[in-house]
Image (cartoon, helix red, strand yellow):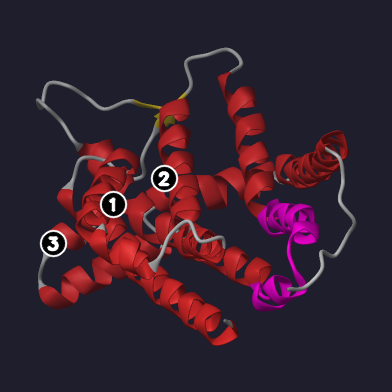
Amino acid sequence: MGTKEKSEMSFLDHLEELRWHIIRSFAAIFVFAILAFVFKTFLFDIVILGPSRPDFFTNQMLCTISQNLNMPVLCINQTQLKLQNINMSGQFTMHIWIAFIAGLVVAFPYIFWEFWRFVRPALYQEEIRHSRGAIFFASILFSIGILFAYYIICPLSVHFLGNYQVSTNVENIINLGSYISTVSSIVLASGIMFELPIFIYFLSKVGLVTSKFLKTYRRHAIVVSLALAAIITPPDVISQVMVCLPLIVLYEAGIIIAKRIEKKKLLRS
């Protein structure tokens, strides 16, 4: 068995170390949030309001497909969604909130690196060697989840919720805070859920889950995936299925990862 990278630390030393990792992580978020706050026009007009614009990539692509297939229902968000603000400080508050979220998203690789630096001394050299690339893959999966939600789920959600009516006598006048809350929650939740293989990897490394366990509870995982998809997406079947399918694929990838870890453990024993 290998030796630990650092000597044993007391509980208070660990807390102090964790505190500085957290401080540096928040500092990174703060720096990127300031940059996002400064570039307000790009942040809101291009990024945040993008899925609601007719010229957004996904909306244009679906309209092109609808023309080729003669299926008008696929052409979405062709009328610019109008938003309103009803609070005196509403727009300023949303500006700060979105700047913080943007800072969190951009700083995620650094935050994960800080987390990795905190747990690394507790690992053996063999475990560190087999964990190389964790930061890279965690960042890639998070980015894929963000982009998947932004380009696929958000346009569908905006179209469904922005145009849904219980009666033709009721007009949809969307509040800015409601729109931003919907888009940001979908994007962040998707980014976190795409980290599922990373979570399974670390749980398998410490022996908390096995491939047999994951296979046994595969059906339960599908039900949980459907429930999560229903929570983070609007109540339309297409959006829920499009969120659920990647989760199931990631769960299956987690089973493969757990199998590989078990094989390596058998070879070392």
The magenta segment is: 107-133
- What secondary structure prevails in the magenta region? helix
Question: Which secondary structure, mark 2?
Answer: helix
Compared across the picture, whether 99 is left or right of 216 comes to right
Type of amino acid at the residue the image marks with label 2: Ile
Per the image, is 78 magenta? no
Instruction: Name the side, left or right, on which 244 lies relative to 39.
Output: left
Give how far across and how far down residue 250 sits, in percent.
38, 66
- Badge 3 crowding class, 10 Å Cα cut-off, few under 14, some 14 to 19, many 20 or more, is some
Give the percent coordinates (x, y) of residue 244: 27, 57
- The quarter in which the N terminus is drawn is bottom right
**Residue beneath the point at 62% across and 47% down:** 43
Nearer-the-camera pick, 8 or 175: 8
Q: Which residue is mark 2?
A: 186
Kindly identify which residue carries mark 3.
72
**What element does badge 3 sit on?**
helix
Q: Which of the two labelled residues, at mark 2 and mark 1, occupies the earlier sequence position?
A: 2
Badge 2 density bin: few <14, some 14–19, many ≥20, Cα 10 Å: many
Q: Is residue 35 above or below residue 2?
A: above
Observer-side mark, 3 or 1, equals 1
Q: Is residue 248 left or right of residue 68?
A: right
Question: To which residue does mark 1 refer?
Answer: 225
